[in-house]
Image: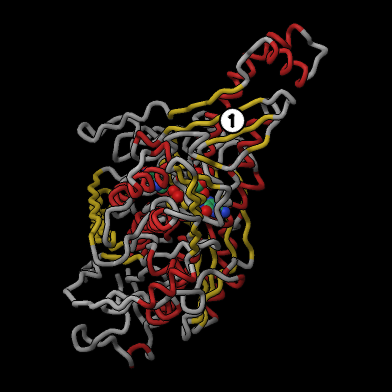
Amino acid sequence: QADAQKAAKSIKIQYQDLPAIITIQVPGLDQLHIGGQEHFYLETNVTVAVPRDQDEIEIFSSTQSPSQTQSCVARVLGVPSNRVHVRVKRIGGGFGGKEFRANILSNVVALAAHRRPVRCMLDRDEDMLMTGGRHPFYAKYKVGFSESGRVLALDVTYYSNAGNSTDLSTSVVSKAVVHMENSYLVPNIRGCGVACRTHLPSNTAFRGFGMPQAMLVCEDWISAIALKLGRTSEQIRELNLYTEGDLTPYNQVLEGVTLRRCWDECLDRAKIHERRAQIQDFNRQNRWTKKGLAVVPTKCGIAFKEVFLNQAGALVHIYTDGSVLLAHGGTEMGQGLHTKMIQVQTRCGRSATRHTSCHSVANSSATAASVSSDLYGAAVLNACNILNQRLQPYKDQDPQGNWKSWVKAAYFERVNLSTNGFYRTPGLDYDSKTNSGRMFHYFAYGVCCSVVEIDCLTGAHKTLSSTIVMDVGNSLNPAIDIGQVEGAFMQGIGLFTNEQLLYSPDGVLMTRGPGTYKIPGFGDIPTLLQVSLLRDAPNDNALYSSKAVGEPPLFLAASVFFALKDAIATARLEAGLSGPFQLDSPATAERIRMACADCFTKMCPPAEPGTYKPWAILV
Ligand SMILES: Nc1nc2c(c(=O)[nH]1)N[C@H]1C(S)=C(S)[C@@H](COP(=O)(O)O)O[C@H]1N2
Ligand SMILES: Cc1nc(=O)[nH]c2[nH]cnc12
Ligand code: MOS
């Protein structure tokens, strides 16, 4: 890409500055702004394109959607899709950032590779400038509740900053709206989602796909109710938790609700009553250092909202030496999909998996929505069952034989030893006209209790402990799943407490690398991080009773955000301030410091908007 960078520098562009729309923010009551997030995958977007004979082209791309890369390149080159061979060995992290945005690189590299192979990998700053990230959200809400703390009515409008193209923005904001109530029963509810087109680079999917933003707003009004009623926020949460058989706002009956089990087990493991007493004691003895605690649940609907995406293919060959080749349409991005697929295959034979290619499986959906193990696992199982049925007669004829002898016997009888497997998630029949039917295949649940300590004078904070109980059904691979919970949780800590994208008033991103954009470091890991997977919680809706684990745990980091709010609320009491207050996400040191209103913050009140030109703006 050195040539491309040299070429780009030599181009002189005449710009005419036109009015630009950058922000989605309008000040108002009961509102919350949630900043965007850079994927910061270790591997930036990269593509190698190799022209082959008969106007064919081979593309090696760091994409989560090989089929979409194939159809985009086909359109760009003006050839049918069957001329474009896209291959994905493994991705150095995707997190949703390579679901739709990888194409802005693979399209141009394919075009440049007209005569000879071309490779291009974006530098970190180029990737951060061009490929978008998590949607910034701005929300306005009204909530009604009884003296006892029961939520009675809720009205939320979510505005997302979509950037300059649709990309996945309408899908993100619609998945956000259907998570506006998180884990709580709200009898009267209205939600609206607006994807706002702006002149920023297009924002896109990012682990959680709008659900974390939506649920943070939910937990914000829950904590406001607690402050209003002078109760702990966990009392309000417990009072309103969904239970078995409840109806969601889209009239899906909740079955197999393990929320209460996760909640009780988390409170027990976190020894919350002792912790609460210790914190009260500590806070009484310290004016300028405060501790806070919060317990936050999450409920995530599992399925692509676009029904047609809930399909998956696999391809299995058995060779005459007995070795097996397994290909499926999912991409490995570090989440352990290939490992889990080999486990499925091994439960019915031996295997080796190949890298993903659109020549092995056609029309694959993006590896996204945390459903890939469910979908591709079922497709692999389907293929295995077909082949095992074909081999069964040879096993019966020669029970003393072995895998290789049965394969040979079948081969010499001209039995087809290849097959593809397929799976489509059943029963997704939600109809928005009647607001009835099943929108999600099942739900993933989890609860986390976090304890933090803040320095009221600097705004610095430390997460002392986080106790997570996650329902992953019967885990296919506990090591992978615990790793996913830990990784998602830390990415959530980044989102809610330290990753802040700063834009100039003209919409130019100023934070373009790890020097200015602070992703979680070792010091951000809770001093005590306990992750446990809920036992005896089989999920009869998915492969071997497992559950999706990729995205759902990310939101549990909101327990850190609300533990910070709890500590700040205590600090504000020292200054005679009680009741709800606004704390935008990420809870940076500046925001924590200024929220701890005291005699010092009074000395530097915020300047009147319009009386100065800010050096950075909220987008
Ligand atoms: N190590 C790692 N884990 C990850 C990701 C990743 O890029 N790297 N992507 C996350 C996202 S955004 C999703 S949707 C799921 C996708 O994989 P799955 O569908 O197999 O869970 O993995 C999650 N965990
Ligand atoms: C396209 C899409 N639809 C969803 O419902 N969830 C998702 N996560 C990542 N991509 C998607
Ligand atoms: O669904 Mo993940 O790729 S945002």
Q: Residue 74, image x and y in percent?
A: 37, 44
Could you tell me which residue is drawn at 73 percent across and 8 percent down? 396
Quadrant assignment, res 394: top right
Instruction: Decide: is 264 above or below 409.
Output: below
Q: Is residue 456 left or right of residue 162?
A: right
Q: Is residue 35 left or right of residue 15?
A: right
Q: Residue at coordinates 48% horizontally, 38% vertically from top-left?
A: 358
Query: Is 114 placed above or below 405 here?
Result: below
**Front residue (pair 320, 79):** 79
Q: Amino acid at mark 1?
A: Tyr
Q: How many marks?
A: 1
Instruction: Assess disc 1: are there few (<14), some (14-19) or many (≥20) residues with their C-alpha within 10 Å of its C-alpha.
Output: some
The foreground one among 141 and 234 is: 141
Q: Position of residue 177 (x, y in %)?
A: 30, 49
- Across and down, in percent, residue 199 comes to 25, 67
**SS class, disc 1:** helix
Location of residue 139 by image quarter: bottom left
- Is 491 positioned to the left or the right of 534 in the image? left
* Quadrant of the image occupied by residue 225: bottom left
Is residue 122 visible to us here?
A: yes
Q: Nearer the viewer, residue 284 or 164?
A: 164
Is 395 situated above or below 378? above
* Residue 307 percent location from the top left of the image: 35, 34
Q: For the view shown, which residue lies furthest in the right direction?
A: 400
Residue furthest to the left: 19
Colour mapping: secondary structure
> Looking at the image, can residue 266 be seen?
no
For mark 1, what is the residue?
544
